[in-house]
Image (cartoon, rainbow, N blue to C red):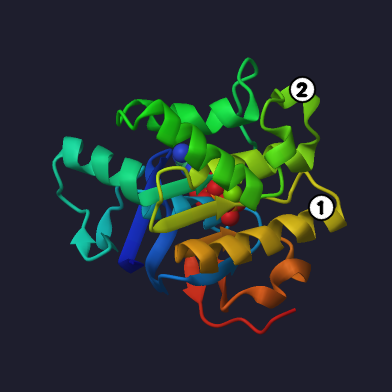
Amino acid sequence: MSLRLADITLTYPDGDTRLTALDQVSLDVPGGSLTAVVGPSGSGKSSLLAVAATLVTPDAGTVTIDGTRTTGLPRGELTALRRHKIGIVFQQPNLLPSLTAAEQLQVMTRIDGRKPRAARNRAMELLDSVGLADQADRRPHQLSGGQRQRVNIARALMNDPTVLLVDEPTSALDHDRGAAVIDLITRLTQQQATATVLVTHDRTHLTAADRIVEVQDGRLHLPAPAR
Ligand code: ADP
Ligand code: MG
């Protein structure tokens, strides 16, 4: 259970030239550990997650997930690997308005044909672990911002990923709710033994991180002193 980025360089087209979003970045995240990534806006944090999630192919370098090198994998295998091994939590929850909390999780397994009862049980188990067992039948508009983000996190864990990638999950939350969400991610990292990367611009919540790294102009600096 691990995530390994080696010598990742990523550029985007920028007029006549190219903008270097990631510059020879290497990062090793063992299972059951949480690496926090901090850095100013535009430094490359989301690009780093997109590459780790295999959603974006870098110009150079390799992404290895559970010992499988993802570079050059056929598209179908890559899609399957992403579905089974990677949980992604974006800044905005993107929940489906018409579905209950439990159903948001259950639809994740539809494609894989997990039995409906097993999917429901797993969904309830995860909602319980994020403190929302009693909200399972509520729809997004009946939940608070913090609760929606908890559903979002539980949903990312539905397929038992080995890698959990989280992008600024607290940006829409107040301080206390933000702290509770970070605590939750820390606890789930241990319980589910995920290799977790947590991007945040807010260092105040990071006492529980196993490691804090800093991105500046696409370069990774390790380790940055805590706060
Ligand atoms: P962060 O998440 O730290 O704010 P990003 O990874 O989103 O940083 O962006 C890093 C740099 O890459 C920024 O200069 C941004 O403008 C640029 N960038 C990000 N995504 C794209 C894209 N799809 N096309 C072109 N440039 C991009
Ligand atoms: Mg970002």
Q: Please identify the residue farthest to the top as the structure is shown.
A: 98
- Judge whether residue 195 can be spotted in this image: yes
Picture residue at 74% right of the left edge, 62% below the top: 202
In terms of image quadrants, where is residue 21? bottom left
- Work out whether residue 2 or residue 6 is closer to the camera in this orientation and state it: 2
- The residue that label 2 is drawn on is 141
Q: How many labels does the image show?
A: 2
Q: What residue type is labelled 2?
A: His
- Work out whether residue 86 or residue 51 is closer to the camera in this orientation and state it: 86
Q: Do the residues labelled 2 and 1 touch (CB within 8 Å)?
A: no
In terms of image quadrants, where is residue 134? top right
Callout 1 secondary element: helix
Left or right of 160 on screen, residue 84: left
- The residue that label 1 is drawn on is 177
Above or below for 60 versus 50: below
Left or right of 190 on screen, residue 200: right
Q: Distance between the residues labelled 2 and 1?
A: 18 Å
Tell me the quarter of the image containing the N terminus: bottom left
Percent x, y of residue 104: 55, 29
Above or below for 2 versus 139: below
In terms of image quadrants, where is residue 172? top right
Picture residue at 30% right of the left edge, 28% below the top: 113
Q: Which amino acid does label 1 sit on?
A: Arg
Q: Earlier in the sequence, mark 2 or mark 1?
A: 2
Percent x, y of residue 28: 38, 74
Picture residue at 18% right of the left edge, 41% below the top: 77
